[in-house]
Image: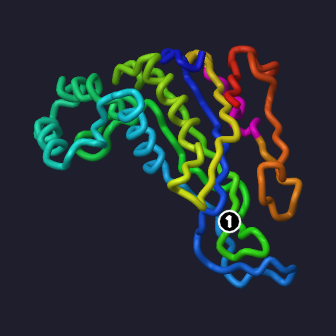
Amino acid sequence: MIYDPSKRHDFVLLFELKNADLGGVYDLTPEGSSGEVKYGLVTDGAFKGLISACAARQYDLPVLIGSRGKVKSHLLRPIVRSSDPHNPLKLELCRYFFDVRLFGLTGATHIPAPMQLSSARSVDPVLPQPPQTTAWYGLYRLQGSYDPHRGQHTGVTAFDLEVFWKTLTGLFKSNPKLLPLQMAARGLWVFSQNPQNRATMPLLEQVQPSKISDLPQSFGDYTLRYPKPGPLEANPEVTLTHWA
């Protein structure tokens, strides 16, 4: 179901980062903090870059983001100069480059993106782990959606979606080279449906982590609420896939 490019897919990904120092010093006593409380943020651009790089490395897929500056400029120049919105060179870029098919292009060479990503923000303020002052923990939430109409235009395939889901969930494997930073994916929930039957009910809000500790320091300090995987009871036209 989640590999079907003719379906609309809305998703939530939860992941955690440990020891990702955001800077600043915080006082965890009841009197308050010595600095402004911060939320962790990972931009959508960072995700697109990481996913594209991993797709190129692990699946040998060509990506425009990895092209050298002069090569990229040479490829895009004919499109920038053309005023034709249906320039066949745009379709050729989509056909060849994985990241263009999925994430589109901005600027003068604008190609609408089938896969839209939000920035990922920590569910709660990111706080240091007592008694340390530079070790941080945060549970992050990323949301996104895939538009099958745009995907048809750019040529997204079932294999492209398979690579996307596997790469997205595989980004958070801890790497000894990144120590002391530690990370882990804590669940992917994908709501799939036919585009003509798009549900008006809120879907992504049905995946809700709630903290059970005033100062969450691990995933165990949260409880999760989400619907049973499969067709939703409230709307059987929507199918939920839970990728643990």
User: From the viewer's perspective, is 155 left or right of 34?
Assistant: left
Query: Could you tell whether 122 is left or right of 91 in the image?
Result: right
Q: Residue at x 31, y 35 (%)?
A: 63
Residue under the image location 25 percent in, 24 percent down = 91
Residue 1: x percent and y percent? 60, 15
Magenta stretch: dominant secondary structure = loop
Is 118 located above or below residue 180 in the figure?
Answer: above
**Residue drawn where x is 49% and y is 30% of the image:** 164
Picture quadrant where residue 150 is located: top left
Per the image, the residue denoted by label 1 is 136
Say if 134 sits above or below 100 in the image. Answer: below
The region drawn magenta spans: 198-207
Magenta-span inclusion, residue 204: yes
Q: Quadrant of the C terminus?
A: top right
**Is residue 118 among what the camera can see?**
yes
Which secondary structure, mark 1? strand
Q: Amino acid at mark 1?
A: Trp
Residue drawn at 29 percent across, 31 percent down: 62
Q: Residue furthest front?
A: 176
Looking at the image, which is closer to me, 232 or 63? 63
